[in-house]
Every structure is written in structure tokens, then in C-alpha cells.
Amino acid sequence: MEDMRVEERHLRSDAERNRKRLLEAAGTLFRERGLDVSVAEIAQAAGVGRGTFFRNFASKEDLIEAIVAERMYEAAAHGEELLEAEDPVEALFGFLSEMLGSQQLDRALFEGLDETWLSKEVIRPAHAAVFDVLGRLLGRAQEAGSVRADVGAMDLLMLFKGACMAAATYANGEFAIVDRNVDLIRASVAVVPGAAPLRGRAPTLEDLGLGE
């Protein structure tokens, strides 16, 4: 019986290692070449067979979902850490800078995904986790009086998406496009005495059909 338990633990350990290898190999290949990389190429780069690939992921789309969700959960975890930062304003825009830099790194992966991917069962809660921590970081910055009170987390995400597009367009430029776009976002939501209130209301995840 003990031998069987040891063998089971060994098999689980091997399976976890193989899954990790597939995620790492796919992330690298997608980053370098986009989403057209084949299952066979991913398996070869991971040092496993096609059978091992399909034991871990039913399809390449499932693998993509897992990678995107993993990236989002990593971003959310970083945001949770920043909630303890002394300066709430720097924490908020540091979070956006980090996400924008990561998105630029994984540009080939994220450019291949349209909005429908955000509603996928695996990605949806990961996206919601990012949205939640961004909202709390924003709330701290607003309480500090440095970010206008009528801005919502979705407003920031929309501005962030525009910054991502700019970063992708000028990815080979010599100037700090990421820093510049974060500065532009920061300037656009800064408190300005006497400024007119924003029209309408801040959109939500539910407005986009992405709420829980």
C-alpha cells in the first residue's frame, strides 16, 4: 500500500512538472511567434509527447486560456501586495506600469485574443480578480485626494487598453513609451480644482457582460 502511495505521488509530481513545462514552452513560443504555433511544436519545446500535451490540455485553446489566466492571477497577486504600500498613488500607477510592461512582453499572445476570451470560464474569474484589486488600489488613491472621485476601475482599464495598443505600435521605438502612457493616464485622472465632472457613470464589468 505504501509503495502504491509513493508511486501515486511520483506520478502526480511528474504530471505537475509536465504541465509547467508545457505552460512555459507555450508562453515563450507564443511570445516569439504568435498563436499560430502548433501543438506538436509546443510539445517538442517542452520535451514531452503529444499524448502528454492532451492529457494536460484538451486543446491548444485550453492551454491559451490557462496561460492568460495565470498571467492575470500573477498581476492580481502583485496588486494585493501593493495595497500595503505607503504611497497609494504610486501603488496604483506602479500597478498599471507593471501590467503594461508585462502585456508588452506577452504582446504576441494578448494581441491574438479578442474580447470574447474574457468571458471564458477559466479567464473570467482571473480577469475579475485583476479588476477587483485595481478598484481597491484606485479607491486608496482617491481617498488620498490625488485621483478624481468620479473615475472608476473600468475607466482606468479602458485607458490602459489604449496604452497597450500604443505600446504595441511603438514596441521597437527607442523612447520609454510605456512610462509615457502611464504618465498620460495619470495626468488624465488627476484631481484638477474646478474641473467639470465626467458625464455619465463609470462602466462596470456587468455592463460588458463580464460580471460574476
Image: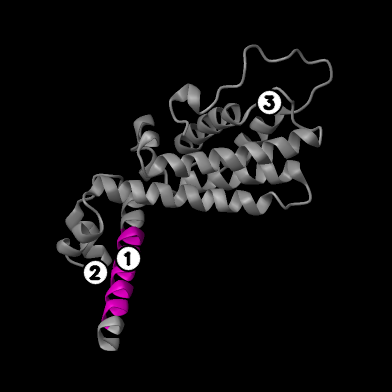
Q: Position of residue 93 (x, y in %)?
A: 67, 41
Q: Is residue 20 magenta?
A: yes
Q: Residue furthest front?
A: 1
Label 3 belongs to which residue? 188
Q: Residues within 10 Å of mark 1 (few under 14, many from 20)?
A: some
Q: Secondary structure at mark 2?
A: loop
Label 2 belongs to which residue? 47
Give the mark nearer the N terminus: 1 vs 3.
1
Label 1 belongs to which residue? 21
Secondary structure of the magenta portion, mostly?
Answer: helix
Residue type (three-letter) at the residue carrying disc 2: Gly
CA gap between label 1 and label 2 equals 8 Å
Q: Residues within 10 Å of mark 2 (few under 14, many from 20)?
A: some
CA gap between label 1 and label 3 equals 42 Å
Residue type (three-letter) at the residue carrying disc 1: Arg
Residue 180 has which mark?
none
Quadrant assignment, res 8: bottom left
Give the mark nearer the N terminus: 3 vs 2.
2
Q: Position of residue 208 (x, y in %)?
A: 46, 24
